[in-house]
Image (spheres, rainbow, N blue to C red):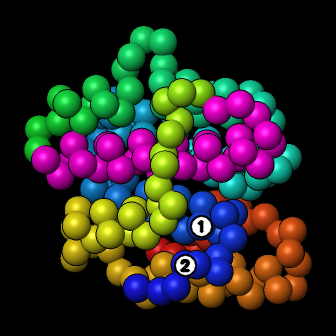
Amino acid sequence: MFNLVSINEYTKAVLVIVMGEYVINMLSKGDGFEHSRKTLDLCWKCIEKWENVEEDVVADLNDCLCPEDLVEFDYYSTISEDALSSNIYMLLYEIASYICEEVMMEHNWPLPEYLDVGEDDFTEFVLEYVKNVNENYFEDYKLQKVLTYCQEKQKEDKNIKFNKEEILKISF
């Protein structure tokens, strides 16, 4: 485990979405996977723009988290055939909630009631959760590579924003 105390919220969000990319591949293909993929793609749009993200992207992400038709992560978790998939859906929900909450706070937009992550050490919580989901699948050193890369790039440019391809190339 590494020290997350001195890491800014943006970098934590990058690390969290990388963890989401690791675990989504453990889901079987179908509606739940497609919903999860769409949600992570919206999270990447938030990561890539952060303080400049468009409101409609955040609105779409909020709709994935709490849609009007109620076909959401909780639903997919409930109908999952096994506990592992059920836990992954809920983990992906928490990851997307965290990223959405951080972006909305960056913009000083009011948070919906359902966005109450409430974890001070959320990244550590997610990291531990991922390890519990499947210890053989998740490797700390890959996440450390992403963290080191982000920190080095941020030394060069404090306002740098990362894109999906760039980060996944390092982590996979």
Mark 2 touches mark 1? (CB < 8 Å): yes
Q: What's drawn in magenta, residue-wise?
A: 83-111
Left or right placement of residue 29 versus residue 52 in this view: left
Residue pointed to by mark 2: 4
Q: Nearer the viewer, mark 2 or mark 1?
A: 2
Q: Dot 1 lies on which element? A: helix
Residue type, label 1: Lys
Q: Dot 2 lies on which element? A: loop
| Sequence order check, earlier mark of 2 and 1 | 2
Left or right placement of residue 114 versus residue 46 in this view: left
Residue type, label 2: Leu
Residue 75: x, y in percent? Answer: 28, 26
97 in magenta:
yes
Res 6 quadrant in image = bottom right
Residue at point 43% right, 70% down?
Answer: 124
Residue pointed to by mark 1: 12
From this viewpoint, is residue 3 visible? Answer: yes
Vertical order, 87 against 30 (above or below): below
33 in magenta:
no
Classified by dominant secondary structure, the portion drawn in magenta counts as: helix
Residue at point 71% right, 83% down?
Answer: 151
